[in-house]
Amino acid sequence: MKLAIALIPALFFASGCGGGKARRAGPPPPTPECKAIVRTAKSWLPEEEENRPLPKDCSDFVGKVFAENKVKLPRTSAAMSIEGEEVRAGELRMADLVFFAGKNGGGKIGHVGIYINNGIFIHQANPGEGVRQESMHSDYWRKRFLRARRILD
């Protein structure tokens, strides 16, 4: 009986454990369509496909990747930046489009890439240079990030 009485306060206090902030649920797993977009984008890397012609620019690359997966996008990065649904940087998911200011900075869209995961995106940096993957957390890209859009659910 004494043991039962001693356990009641312990149970009362134990029920309050873990009552702090709820953990944020992670993003849902990527859909097959999103995985296909990233797989297609990576197939444009120079080490994957040497004979593929270079895209004209960043938006040409993104447009071709999505077109290979039967998704039509506008031709320019500025026009792409109003497609789909706006996404905050902390909520990025595979195949989201990420938009950056051009070389001179400012608030005008000048570049687009495809988000892969863990802060990495894939893009055509400059005409003639080919497709590459880079970190959005580098000083260069972090300072120029403007917005992101989700094209696929």
Image (cartoon, rainbow, N blue to C red):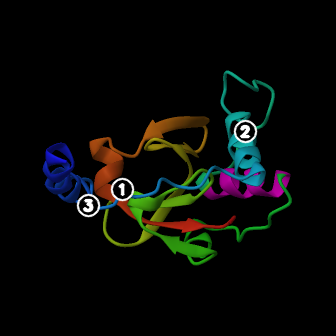
Residue 31 percent location from the top left of the image? 72, 53
Residue 147 percent location from the top left of the image? 43, 67
Q: Are marks 2 and 3 in contact (CB under 8 Å)?
A: no
Question: Vertically, is 130 above or below 24?
Answer: above
What type of secondary structure mainly makes up the magenta span? helix
Question: Vertically, is 110 above or below 143?
Answer: below
Residue 81 percent location from the top left of the image? 55, 72
Looking at the picture, tell me which residue is in the foreground, 93 or 138: 93
Q: Which residues are magenta?
A: 59-68
Give me the residue at 63% from left, 53% from top. 95
Residue 100 percent location from the top left of the image? 43, 60
The residue carrying mark 2 is 39
The residue carrying mark 1 is 23
Q: Amino acid at mark 1?
A: Arg
Within the image, what quadrant is residue 8 found in? bottom left
SS at badge 1: loop
Question: Vertically, is 87 above or below 118?
Answer: below
| Res 121 label | none
User: How far is the residue under mark 2 from the one under mark 1?
Assistant: 31 Å
The residue carrying mark 3 is 19
User: How far is the residue under mark 2 from the one under mark 3?
Assistant: 41 Å
User: How far is the residue under mark 3 from the one under mark 1?
Assistant: 11 Å
Q: Is residue 42 visible?
A: yes
